[in-house]
Amino acid sequence: MDRRRRELLQAGSGAGVLALAGAAGLLKPGEAFAQQWNKAAFDSKTVAATLKALGGGGSTESAQIQITAPDIAENGAVVPITIESAVPRTDTIAILIEKNPSTLSADFEIPAGTDPFITTRVKMAETSNIYAVVKADGKYFHAVKEIKVTLGGCGG
Amino acid sequence: MADPMRIRASMAGDKVEVRVLMSHEMETGQRKDAGGAVVPAHFIQNVTVTHAGKTVLSAQWGTSISKNPFMHFRFKGGKPGEKVTISWVDNKGERRTDEAVIGG
């Protein structure tokens, strides 16, 4: 319990409420999130800074990572993206959008037994490169794809 | 309390295919309202999917996941009739947990 409370305390804004809920025993085991939120990574403004905040020094481009997304997105508020990694021992898949106000969009942790495959929908402020960054066996690999945006999805 | 998630879990070969649609504003904190005041960020930060007591997917999200987030993924080891449980917590500490039974 103690350890979990500490993680929640570190989780940033809103953590006070969670810590209180934890202290009061309102959180049942299994309901609490084992994972914390990497504020430094989500605050990063460039691909290089995001990689660093995620723990990678550098990343190698890999043809084993496939990004499936439209070439042109008419509506930047909803851009479907599928990432599939054939890199052995893929542990995490992160989606980075170079020209968004915050580069990192999502970081998925893929345990053994789960396919290194994820589809989600993201917001894009403007035409930008999308990076799929895969951490596999402690090393970082990426693929990149440009998506042209007709109507931005952040702002009015 | 946010609306329930819509979860569909079904067998695809030996794997369980999960599609989930969550109900959440996913406010970026960049947008201004009609009066020019910044609308504070309100977004899901952590998502955890469990099956038979084991985490099969977890994610950290930023503000650039679309409103009413959608996710599609696959994992091994599930059988029809078993449950998949999905939880999220947002930056205001609001949380929601829903489950679905794996279909055949």
Image (cartoon, grey):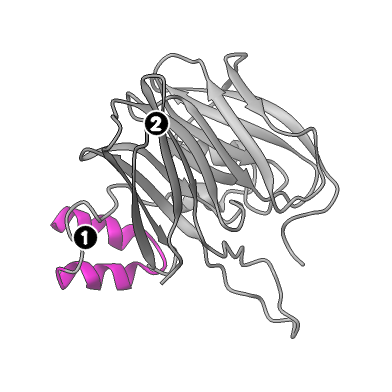
Crowding near the residue tagged with mark 2, few <14, some 14–19, many ≥20 C-alpha atoms within 10 Å: many
Q: Residue at x 62, y 45 (%)?
A: A121
Q: Chain of mark 1?
A: A
Q: Position of residue B15 (x, y in %)?
A: 38, 24
Q: Position of residue A27 (x, y in %)?
A: 20, 63
Vertical placement of residue A60 versus A91, above or below: above
- Mark 2 is on which residue type? Ile
Residue B51 position by quadrant: top left
Q: Nearer the viewer, residue B20 or A120?
A: B20
Which label sits on residue A5?
Answer: 1
User: In the displayed image of the protein, which residue is found farthest to the front?
Assistant: B104
Q: Residue at x 66, y 40 (%)?
A: A80
In terms of secondary structure, what is the magenta stretch mainly? helix
Vertical placement of residue B22 versus A90, above or below: below
Q: Residue at x 57, y 65 (%)?
A: B25
Is the residue at mark 1 from the same chain as the one at mark 2? yes
Between the residue at mark 1 and the residue at mark 2, the CA separation in whole angstroms equals 24 Å
Q: Residue at x 72, y 29 (%)?
A: A145
Q: Position of residue B2 (x, y in %)?
A: 45, 68
Vertical placement of residue B57 versus B11, above or below: below
Say what secondary structure mark 2 lies in.
Answer: loop
Which label sits on residue A110?
Answer: 2
Q: Is residue B102 magenta?
A: no
